[in-house]
């Protein structure tokens, strides 16, 4: 069965890490290439390359965990000091070096996929150099993923687009075409999920796809993106940009760890209102999806990160049940297996 995750950020890695244990799933992840904060700012400004952090995270999420443990540790190592390298991950620098050696970012991605025995496909949504643009309800406009992701005060985005046209990577479009399920989220609405849909060709292929669309709702709200919005409002916003309805919404009903929850409240965030009533027209699955361990930042990491995340095994089990919850899914799986052995 072909499963395509759209996002590429930390939320997508949680999905991928859990689902890769199911050998009957053919996994692909479509990764946004618009990040321009932290280490990615230097990659774009100093080396003239597209951001590599989400690609790196996706490679590690799909990597064979039984091998290359030393390489994994090196790949995620973040420098906590040093002029010019503080805040950089060694993985990003290695990918820059491999791009220079091989002559293209695509070839560098393929090389590291082989190195880490990746089971699945890591697909950049585009190789065009574009930036995100957000227009707010107070009339202001911001250009750049980093500034949209970490605003100084809360404002609602009313219009969202790219600063120039970006053409989708052909293999990315092919992955959408052949998908049985498309998984959106969890992840930041305006800086992780929607940027992929803005790329020319992606929305159109999603509209034409026969795949069912699953949206995994975030655990908490976020300043400048989902604060004050309900789950239904976010679903409808996603559908507006895609031009197609979401089939299944997965919502957490577990309790957020108390210490982390208090921190969110102090920062002005909260659990979003679940107003996905029975008459909404989508299948809504509510279950405990919270990881009990509080997330801690690595040394040298200056960016704001989520304090709590979805539990990778809980989420994977829930999604796997969804994938095989109807007769058509089973028939598609059997058909894919027969076609494989026939070839």
Image (cartoon, helix red, strand yellow):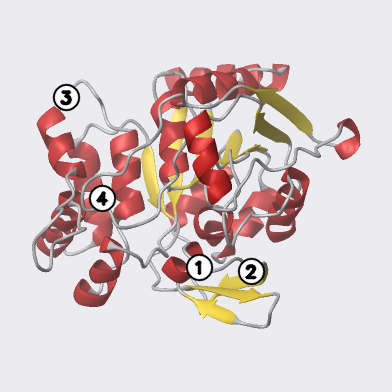
In the rendered structure, which disc, 2 or 4, sits on the residue that comes first in sequence? 4
Q: Nearer the viewer, residue 274 or 52?
A: 274
- Rounded to the nearest angstrom, the CA distance separating label 2 from label 1 is 8 Å
Few, some or many residues within 10 Å of mark 3 (<14, 14–19, 20+) = few
Q: Is residue 238 above or below residue 117?
A: below
**Disc 1 and disc 3: Cα gap in Å?**
40 Å
Please tell me how crowded label 1 is: few (under 14), some (14-19), or many (20+) other residues with Cα within 10 Å.
few
The residue tagged with tag 1: helix, strand or loop? loop
Do the residues under discs 1 and 3 have CB atoms within 8 angstroms?
no
Residue 332 shows in the view: no
**For numbered disc 3, what is the local secondary structure?**
loop
Q: Which mark is residue 151?
A: 1
Q: Give the label on residue 80, or none.
A: none
Q: In the rendering, which numbered label is found on residue 67?
A: 3
* Residue 200 point in image, percent of width and height: 56, 66
Q: Are marks 2 and 4 in contact (CB under 8 Å)?
A: no
Residue toward you, 162 or 306: 306
- Precedes in sequence: disc 2 or disc 3: 3
Measured as percent of width and height from the top left, residue 340 is found at 45, 23
Residue shown at 61% from the left, 17% from the top: 321
């Amino acid at each position: 069965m072909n499963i395509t995750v759209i996002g590429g950020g930390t939320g997508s890695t949680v999905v991928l890490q859990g689902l890769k244990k199911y050998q009957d799933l053919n996994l692909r992840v479509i990764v946004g290439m618009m990040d321009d904060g932290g280490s990615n700012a230097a990659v774009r400004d100093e080396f003239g390359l597209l951001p590599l952090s989400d690609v790196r995270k996706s490679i590690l999420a799909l990597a064979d965990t039984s091998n290359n443990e030393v390489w994994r540790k090196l790949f995620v190592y973040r420098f906590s000091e040093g002029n010019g390298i503080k805040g950089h991950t060694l993985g990003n620098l290695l990918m820059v070096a491999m791009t220079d050696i091989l002559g293209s970012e695509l070839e560098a991605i393929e090389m590291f996929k082989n190195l880490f025995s990746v089971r699945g496909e890591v697909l950049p949504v585009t190789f065009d150099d574009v930036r995100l643009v957000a227009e707010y309800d107070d009339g202001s406009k911001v250009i750049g993923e980093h500034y949209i992701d970490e605003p100084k005060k809360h404002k609602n985005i009313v219009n969202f687009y790219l600063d120039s046209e970006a053409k989708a990577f052909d293999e990315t479009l092919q992955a959408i075409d052949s998908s049985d399920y498309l998984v959106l989220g969890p992840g930041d609405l305006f800086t992780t999920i929607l940027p992929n849909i803005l790329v020319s060709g992606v929305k159109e292929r999603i509209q034409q796809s026969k795949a069912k669309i699953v949206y995994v709702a975030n655990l908490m709200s976020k300043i400048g993106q989902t604060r004050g919005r309900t789950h239904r409002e976010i679903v409808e916003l996603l559908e507006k940009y895609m031009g197609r309805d979401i089939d299944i919404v997965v919502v957490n009903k577990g309790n957020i760890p108390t210490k982390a929850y208090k921190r969110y409240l102090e920062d002005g965030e909260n659990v979003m209102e679940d107003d996905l009533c029975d008459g909404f027209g989508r299948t809504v699955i509510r279950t405990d999806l919270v990881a009990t361990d509080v997330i801690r930042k690595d040394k040298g990491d200056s960016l704001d990160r989520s304090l709590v995340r979805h539990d990778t095994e809980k989420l994977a089990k829930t999604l796997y049940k969804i994938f095989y919850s109807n007769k058509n899914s089973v028939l598609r799986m059997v058909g894919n297996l027969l076609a494989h052995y026939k070839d």
